[in-house]
Image: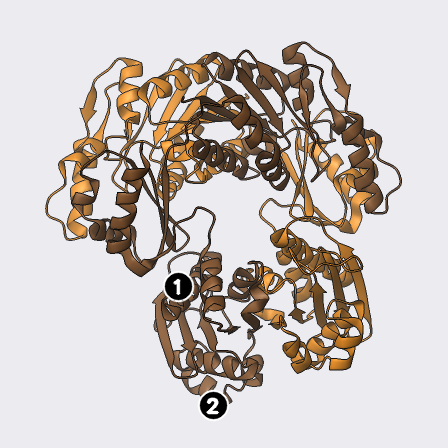
Chain colours: A brown, B orange
Amino acid sequence: MRYRAEILTIGDELLKGSVLNTNALFLARELTDMGFSVQAQVACPDSPAVIGQKLAQALSDRGDLVILSGGLGPTPDDVTREALAHYFQVPLVFSKAQYAGIKKHYRKHGLSTVPSDVRKEAYYPENAVPLMNRYGIALGFYVRQGNGLVVVLPGVPSELEKMFKELVRPLLVRHFSDLEPRPKLVVKIVGLSEPAIMRKLGRDFFKGHPFEFGIYPEAGEVSIRIMADRQKIIQRLTAKIKKRLGRSVYAYEENRVLSEAVGKALVLRKRTLSIAESCTGGTLSSEITKIPGASRYFKGGMVVYHNSLKEDLGIEKSLLKKKGAVSREVALALAKAVRRRMRTYYGIGITGIAGPTGGSAQKPVGLVFIGLATPQTARLKKILFWGDRRQVQTKAAKKALEYLWHEIQ
Amino acid sequence: MRYRAEILTIGDELLKGSVLNTNALFLARELTDMGFSVQAQVACPDSPAVIGQKLAQALSDRGDLVILSGGLGPTPDDVTREALAHYFQVPLVFSKAQYAGIKKHYRKHGLSTVPSDVRKEAYYPENAVPLMNRYGIALGFYVRQGNGLVVVLPGVPSELEKMFKELVRPLLVRHFSDLEPRPKLVVKIVGLSEPAIMRKLGRDFFKGHPFEFGIYPEAGEVSIRIMADRQKIIQRLTAKIKKRLGRSVYAYEENRVLSEAVGKALVLRKRTLSIAESCTGGTLSSEITKIPGASRYFKGGMVVYHNSLKEDLGIEKSLLKKKGAVSREVALALAKAVRRRMRTYYGIGITGIAGPTGGSAQKPVGLVFIGLATPQTARLKKILFWGDRRQVQTKAAKKALEYLWHEIQ
């Protein structure tokens, strides 16, 4: 059975454009994966009247499931629980269990008393079932509406995500027991542009049984997402993609990132890595160390921002003077030097012009050199990136990971 | 005059959670800054029926302005222009001017013929006024509805943003000529929790002339956003905040980040900085170097992930063995050593347990020591952070910036 879902994200900060709505993305993806047909995402203000109106609209649009998030905090502008109680015409009741959790939370952090305004976060509408929040303060809850469900979750993304996975997903599986997840294929690709991917896939890729196809460029890489009615169609498409895109695919999973795929490949081959980065200023090291267990292959890095630090690492002053800090020679020398100094198998050296100033006709903003050294060789990539300072930094870090990925294979 | 606006973003990819809805954020912020009251953001699927229904709802909710984006592309699933023509019961007509632009675009890229499905991107509803797209293929347009406006823009973010600034903003200023941008105050705060800020502001802060107040925790800091009817109210509130929150406020601007405020303070005092980070793995260096001109005060950093690198920096093996790599002694030693090695005024040393593994009863996951050394002294902060690995890393980096910020003042 296909059920219809609607997502209501609540908060003036969304309507004023103060924060990016990542909760809507997370919930949409999770619900789609479970087999729901998401009909709309609505962001609405911290206004009980508007929340009530949008909830009524969602339910009247034959919504089987409405998930609301946000507006459960301690401050006066947080009115979601009051709005729900008003909508259902029931009083708010107190969850002793959640309040005990809040007190424990405070004690753990050396605070003996819970402020009175925080107490309100343990309340829920009388007709609701509480959803305990072990990761924060605000209680979630859900209400049965006819055959459907209204679920309310806190807006803090980490709390929302954990509560969804631990409490809401099992609840939905129980409640909508004949839900049919549609087979899905996620393909994460580096080193090929959108048109290049389409050319490699070819026109005949789209013949035969129909399927839904989406291709999305994001931050130096491209994702393909496919949904079909049967697993067999997905299998056939997967085989074609493997053949036609080859090693440009680094993952067939939604939440895998390139630095994780690189990390797994390094562990598998028992290889270690060190980095000397200049223009990326720590961005590549940060990207690598965000992966749990990175200490197994990453020994360390240097942010050789100032030329004196490049010299400390063993780059000769004369080379820096003759070729310039942003040069293929210095990128190679950094890769070799950091590899030697930190005694690793791979060494990466990055130097470039992130901007907005510092560019010239010969060396424009966006120019980046990436050196990659192994015990046997040292190679180099020269790339000109588009974008502002931050985009150049993140794209260069991604490009270095891509380079390493292809080298390890 | 206050006008009400609603934003409709169209595309199945939004409802499946395949792409982040940055257009909604951009439009919400621009409209709010212009003085509109944004009532809702609605993401809806590529379905003519749903688009028509959501547009009708938006207009019936007393919407003076409805902006739609997306679904103007060449593929069969792009149906926004057809949906609008159907809603207004008018035929689609052809823009020769836009088509000439499309042909030019194709020629520029070495293509002599425009594919037939691309031709449809030059059509618009007969009752609309075209908005020429110089940055891409799809024509935008707008329709007068009573006293209000319905504006339709392509969904490619770069095209949408440029067309909004060049065409839509002037149109809105002309059409809603008595639009009054509301005075706005943004306050960015570190080192105080939401409840602590509320206590410090006090109850009397909210007395007197009414104003809109929002308080938003995000990644180790808190923002306050206030809107009022008159600049005088904003001035009075600003004075109160300055007095009550003092040096915990690092900026009174929307787009200022803490690392930028720290950078300005360092430049002002002609001080330099270096960093030795372990558990944060480059995150602090990356945060600092994303600011243009960081090379004026940031000399460099070391990601001392492996213990051998800590020893290379001069941390004694016996200290690492006796106290452990995660200890107040090692954090202090890292701060002092990196300051000396890199010859800077400030040195920061960070060591901790980012998790998910590696914790113990004495040293749990989330425990972080931050050392801060100057030529005169060396001080230490011990903090236990909540959250997953990435959160611990980003919060610890933010906390180190906060520590430095207070030290510089």
Q: Name the residue furthest left.
A: B112
Say which quadrant the N terminus of chain B sits in: top right
Say which quadrant the C terminus of chain B sits in: bottom right
Relative to residue A285, is residue A6 depicted above or below? above
Looking at this view, is A384 or B75 the one in front? B75
Residue located 64% across and 48% down the image? B219
The subunit letter for the residue under badge 2 reads A
Q: Is residue A297 visible?
A: yes
Residue A118 lies in quadrant: top right
Q: Is residue A389 visible?
A: no
Indicate the amino acid at tag 1. Answer: Glu
Task: Name the residue carrying label 2.
Answer: A318
Residue located 41% across and 19% down the image? B54
Looking at this view, is B397 or A279 the one in front? B397
Indicate the amino acid at tag 2. Answer: Ser
Question: Residue A115, position in %: x, y?
Answer: 84, 34
Residue located 26% across and 13% down the image? B89
Tell me the number on the disc at residue A402: 1
Question: Residue A206, position in %: x, y?
Answer: 21, 40
Relative to residue A92, is residue A286 depicted above or below? below
Badge 1 or badge 2: first in the primary sequence:
2
| Numbered disc 1: secondary structure | helix
Relative to residue A143, is residue B404 depicted above or below? below
